[in-house]
Amino acid sequence: MADFKKKYDVVVAGAGVSGVAAALAAARMGQSVALLEKQAVTGGLATSGMIIIYLPLCDGMGRQVTFGIAEELMRASLRFSPCRLGKDWGGPGGPDARTRFAAPFSPAGMIVAFEKLLADAGVDLWYDTLVCKTVTSRGAVAAVEVENVSGRGRIEGKRFIDATGDSGVVRRAGGSVTTGHNTNGSTLWFMAGNPDPGRRYPLGANVNIQTIPMYKDVDLDEKYTLSGKGVSEFIRHGHGVVFDHYSQLYAKDPEDRFRYYPLYLPCMPLFRKIAHVNGRAAVNADQFNTRREDSVGLVGDWRAAGKIWETPYGSLLPENLEGILAAGRNICSCGDAWEAFRVIPAAAMTGEVAGTAAALSIAKNCRPSKLSLKQLRSALAAKKFVFHIDDLPPVSAGAASDVFTEE
Ligand SMILES: Cc1cc2nc3c(=O)[nH]c(=O)nc-3n(C[C@H](O)[C@H](O)[C@H](O)COP(=O)(O)OP(=O)(O)OC[C@H]3O[C@@H](n4cnc5c(N)ncnc54)[C@H](O)[C@@H]3O)c2cc1C
């Protein structure tokens, strides 16, 4: 089959939440944008991984901290979901710990909503297209090679965004990354038939997202996450867990087959942390509630009320590599900070920053690393972004603490 060649202003690799946000931000600023996705759906782990909980955009103290496309994507995902948004921002009086501004969503609802937003913005979405090589020229990313049913092609761009969830574009350019540890061996999230009332993540009358622990005391590091064989072993193990779970259930009562059954399994390996870029700046574990002079946005910490992280622009810029920005769980957030930044709201926020910075750096004819922070912030402020904790409204008296749990 013939090789092909295409050229865009901005090329985004990976159509997970961060890639979708990045592509929307750049396209809405007038750039031609390619969004390259190896699967046949948008949403990445959020949809293919059956994750379904859009974690809070607030600080659990009654204040919204993350704005812009992060909120737009949450509301869009709920349009086709049988779920309601929490009524408040985690202030006093909520009925339980899930009243923070967060919501479960239907994965299918998220996929179709994202596609419509991308189409409206004029993003060229390439499905079933694997980015398999990064081409650099004089220290900057100049093109990516992709493989799809048309054969192998080259996609050139003025700016690139690595939203692959595993820093795959940066790694393929030889850029430096830090790999993650997934302690306690992760949990399998999958879609199940289950008619019981009071289920934790109900998606309809008989449908639920169910979770089962996968391993005990196993630390999944790059021997699993960045090894083709390790990934296959991890996925097959998860399927075996489902097989055993239902076999044991039906051994007690064969009629349970008509009430409890698996409906759909994740199509992406459920690794929380794979590899983040080593950036020109980092968010370190102790840097919550800390002022970062080059902050470009805020995220709350889904695990603890009152914990807020400022995001330095340099954490989106891979060290020693030009022409590319990181987004989502690829940004340089280290140790415990990675736990706060690897989730959906932070993915959307950092994606929007990366897309905005890519577009602005083209318009200003400068490298992303040389972009004026003032100009970037002014573009983000127009989307209601807040950069420093001190600029949030004060916490109202009596605001309640609120903690989210994830299995
Ligand atoms: C078990 C588990 C539970 C979780 N629970 C929650 C939760 O309750 N709430 C929450 O907010 N977050 C949760 N998360 C985390 C969250 O879902 C993700 O970390 C977040 O969605 C990451 O988004 P992303 O865009 O950075 O990356 P990803 O979702 O990983 O998206 C990357 C995309 O890039 C594509 N891609 C990768 N490589 C290539 C390539 N070479 N070529 C082309 N395309 C490529 C992938 O197919 C994918 O679509 C959970 C994660 C796990 C594993």
Image: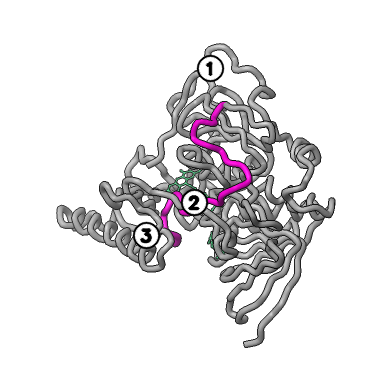
Q: Are marks 1 and 3 in contact (CB under 8 Å)?
A: no
Tag 2, which secondary structure?
Answer: strand
In three-dimensional space, the C-alpha distance between marks 1 and 2, rounded to whole angstroms, equals 37 Å
Task: Give the amino acid at mark 2.
Answer: Thr
At horizontal 50% and vertical 42% (from top left) the residue drawn is: 334
C-alpha gap between disc 2 and disc 3: 13 Å
Residue 2 vertical placement versus 194 (above, below): below
Position of 266 compared to 144: left or right?
A: left
| Position of residue 395 measured from the top left corner of the image (x, y, whole percent) | 60, 17
Colour convention of the picture = one colour
Q: Is residue 63 above or below residue 319?
A: above
Task: Report x, y in % for residue 252.
Answer: 15, 53
- The residue beneath circle 2 is 178
The residue identified by callout 1 is 399
Read off the magenta span: 265-289
Who is closer to the viewer here, 267 or 283? 283
